[in-house]
Structure formats: structure tokens, C-alpha cells
Image (cartoon, helix red, strand yellow):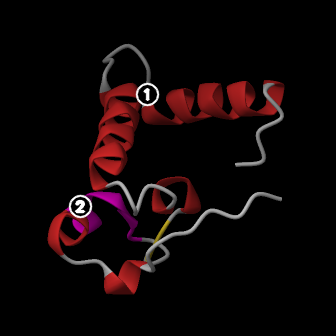
Amino acid sequence: MARIEVIPDDSWDGALGELYPRVVDRAYGRVDNILAVHSLNPRGMAAHQGLYESAMAGTATLRKVEREIIALVVSLENDCHY
């Protein structure tokens, strides 16, 4: 298992602190690992979040649940554990 250094989200300030409201999972009160790995590179985190937001809200022809199902199937096909 790979180990990637991250800055704990309760220590975020500056650019990371500004990103926190965009990336925190409000249901669980934490930042998902898939985004936390970008904590050493806030610009990378912002780009990742922007891509996610575009993919999940970028089309009027699919509901959010349908986009999530597509993401799930792609992850399963790629053997992605996330």
C-alpha cells in the first residue's frame, strides 16, 4: 500500500484553508483521501475538485445519481478501490 504524506485537514491554512469549504464532505466532516493527497499542492487539489465538479454537474442530460453510477462502474472496471 502506498503512503502519501498529507497535511491534516484541521491544520489547513492559506490556500488550503480557502479550499476547505469546497472539498470537505459535509456528511462526514472530513476531506476524502482522494482529495487529501493533494494537500501539499493546493493548485492540484483545486484542479482535481474543478474536474470533479464539472463531471458531476456538467451535463443536464444525466441526473447526479446516474453520473455517480457511471463513476462506480468505471472504478470497478479499473480495479480502483476508491
> Is 27 displayed left or right of 82 in the figure?
left
| Image height of 2 relative to 21, above or below | above
Circle 2 residues within 10 Å: few <14, some 14–19, many ≥20: some
Identify which residue is drawn at 83% across, 34% down: 79
* 38 or 81: nearer the viewer: 38
> Is 80 displayed left or right of 44 in the figure?
right
Q: How many marks?
A: 2
| Magenta-span inclusion, residue 11 | no
| Magenta-span inclusion, residue 25 | yes
Identify which residue is drawn at 55% across, 53% down: 34
Precedes in sequence: disc 1 or disc 2: 2
Residue 11 coordinates in the image, percent (x, y): 34, 85
Identify which residue is drawn at 52% across, 58% down: 37
Disc assigned to residue 2: none
Element marked by disc 1: loop
The kind of residue on which mark 2 rests is Leu
Q: Which residues are magenta?
A: 19-26
Residue 54 coordinates in the image, percent (x, y): 32, 28
* 10 or 26: nearer the viewer: 10
Disc assigned to residue 63: 1
Element marked by disc 2: helix
* Residue at the extreme bottom: 10
| Image height of 65 relative to 22, above or below | above
Give the distance between the C-alpha atoms of the residues marked 1 and 2, in whole angstroms.
Answer: 26 Å
| Image height of 8 relative to 34, above or below | below
Residue 16 coordinates in the image, percent (x, y): 25, 66
Residue under label 2? 19
> Is 63 displayed left or right of 49 in the figure?
right
Circle 1 residues within 10 Å: few <14, some 14–19, many ≥20: few
The kind of residue on which mark 1 rests is Arg
